[in-house]
Image: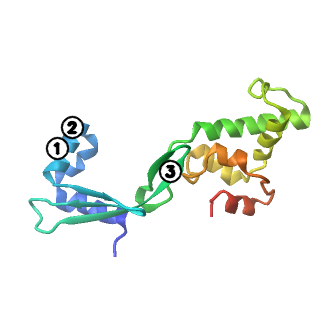
Amino acid sequence: MLSTGEWVVLISASMIGPAARNLPCLSIVEQRKFLLNCRAKVQVEAKAVKISLNLKEHPDPINISVDAKLVSKGSELRLAVAPDNGSAKHEPDPVLLRLIANAFAARDYLIDGKSSPIISDYSQRHLRKLARLSFLAPDIIKAIIQGSHPAHLTGRRFLRAGTIPLDWESQRTMFGFE
């Protein structure tokens, strides 16, 4: 059985033809026209997005299913679709990036007394909360920088976490990296 990623490649190459290969290069209007001609139907479910195409050249409908999930980002609910059924990678979250930068600045201030303009207006209590984040596992920080962290991970979740364990394995579990 083929994975969804392989299935899509086989479908686009052999069944849909040259028009589908050029689909990413087309304008939004041209893409829409192509999909309407294919009588594309998209069904969004709790754990997947299902796409059905009816092509003139192919007697049976072509069905594609891609794993997805609804995630909460602040006050919004978004659909996260992972490329090639892998882990969802997206643009790095600027809030999380700023939080990590502030965490290291807060730690430097609290330990070494090095002042930084990015944290100069924060209370001691907030500085202590921030400094805890500088002790996150290196792979968690790397995932935040690369944008490959779990989609449900927000700055609010980090700051509201009561006690962040120093054990990296427990941190991964706490913030959904496993």
> Most extreme residue toward the front, as rendered?
75
Query: Do the residues bearing badges 1 and 3 touch, measured as CB atoms within 8 Å?
Result: no
Compute the Cα span from label 2 to label 1: 6 Å
- Work out whether mark 2 precedes mark 3 in sequence or the reverse, and give the earlier one: 2
Judging by the rendered image, the residue that carries numbered circle 2 is 29
Q: Amino acid at mark 3?
A: Lys
Would you say 151 lies left or right of 34 here? right
Dot 1 lies on which element? helix
Front position among marks 1 and 3: 1
| The quadrant where residue 10 appears | bottom left
Dot 2 lies on which element? helix
Judging by the rendered image, the residue that carries numbered circle 3 is 89
Would you say 87 lies left or right of 127 here? left
| Quadrant position of the C terminus in the picture | bottom right
Q: Amino acid at mark 1?
A: Lys
Judging by the rendered image, the residue that carries numbered circle 1 is 33
The image position of residue 11, as x and y in percent, is: 24, 62
Crowding at mark 2 (Cα within 10 Å: few <14, some 14-19, many 20+): few
| The quadrant where residue 57 appears | bottom left
Q: Amino acid at mark 2?
A: Val
Would you say 54 lies left or right of 154 here? left
Instruction: Residue at 15% x, 60% y: name it.
Output: 54
Compute the Cα span from label 2 to label 3: 27 Å
Instruction: Residue at 42% x, 62% y: name it.
Output: 46
Q: Camera-side residue: 161 or 68?
A: 161
- Which colouring convention does the figure follow? rainbow
The image position of residue 49, as x and y in percent, is: 35, 59
The image position of residue 124, as x and y in percent, is: 85, 34
- Work out whether mark 1 precedes mark 3 in sequence or the reverse, and give the earlier one: 1
Compute the Cα span from label 1 to label 3: 29 Å
In the displayed structure, 161 sits above or below 53; it is: above
Dot 3 lies on which element? loop
